[in-house]
Image: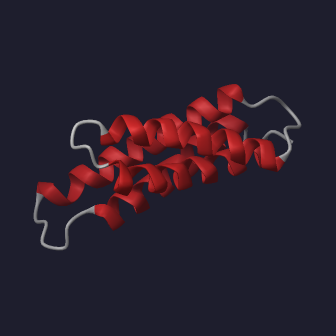
């Protein structure tokens, strides 16, 4: 698996998990899919951005740090409309961290 596909797959999975965890417990119908798809797409973007910034033979700690920074930035942008940074930024940083680790492992 190359680094871009590793970032995309990891971002998709972690973003979908984040969307599932952040949706309301009483959501129904389309309201269930919107947070999942939104956070999955954010995870894909984080994975692609980290993959393009990561050079071959990048240490895991550097990939993780870069991924967390990208995830934090994307979380800040996602929290702008509702000023919900306290909920969105930490989870987005965790998704970016996972993407960074996956990309750094694939770049070896």
The front one of 76 and 50 is 76
How far across and how far down the image is residue 93, in percent? 53, 50
- Give left or right: position of 29 versus 9: left
Residue 80 appears in view: yes
| Quadrant location, the N terminus | top right
Q: Residue furthest bottom?
A: 25
Q: Is residue 103 visible?
A: no
Whole-percent x, y for residue 83 in the image: 26, 43
The residue located at (48%, 34%) in the rendering is 45
At 45% from the left and 37% from the top, the residue drawn is: 74
Decide if residue 100 is on the left or right side of residue 32. Answer: right
The quadrant where residue 94 appears: bottom right
Query: Which coloring applies here?
Result: secondary structure
- In this rendering, position of residue 10 left or right of residue 73: right
Q: Above or below — where is 8 with respect to 55?
A: below
Asked if residue 75 lies left or right of residue 68, the reply is: left
Measuring from the top left, give residue 41's x and y in whole percent.
39, 41
Residue at the spot 57% in from the left edge and 39% down from the top edge: 47
Q: In the figure, 64 relative to 70: above or below?
A: below
The residue positioned 37% from the left and 48% from the top of the image is 39
The one nearer the camera, 64 or 85, is 85
Quadrant that contains the C terminus:
top right
């Amino acid at each position: 698996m190359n680094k871009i596909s590793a970032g995309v797959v990891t971002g998709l999975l972690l973003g979908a998990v984040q969307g599932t965890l952040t949706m309301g417990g009483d959501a129904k119908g389309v309201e269930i899919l919107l947070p999942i798809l939104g956070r999955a797409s954010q995870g894909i973007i984080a994975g692609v951005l980290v993959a393009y910034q990561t050079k071959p033979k990048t240490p895991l700690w550097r990939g993780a740090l870069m991924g967390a920074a990208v995830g934090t930035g994307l979380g800040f942008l996602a929290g702008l409309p509702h000023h919900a940074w306290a909920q969105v930024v930490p989870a987005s940083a965790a998704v970016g961290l996972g993407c960074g680790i996956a990309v750094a492992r694939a770049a070896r």
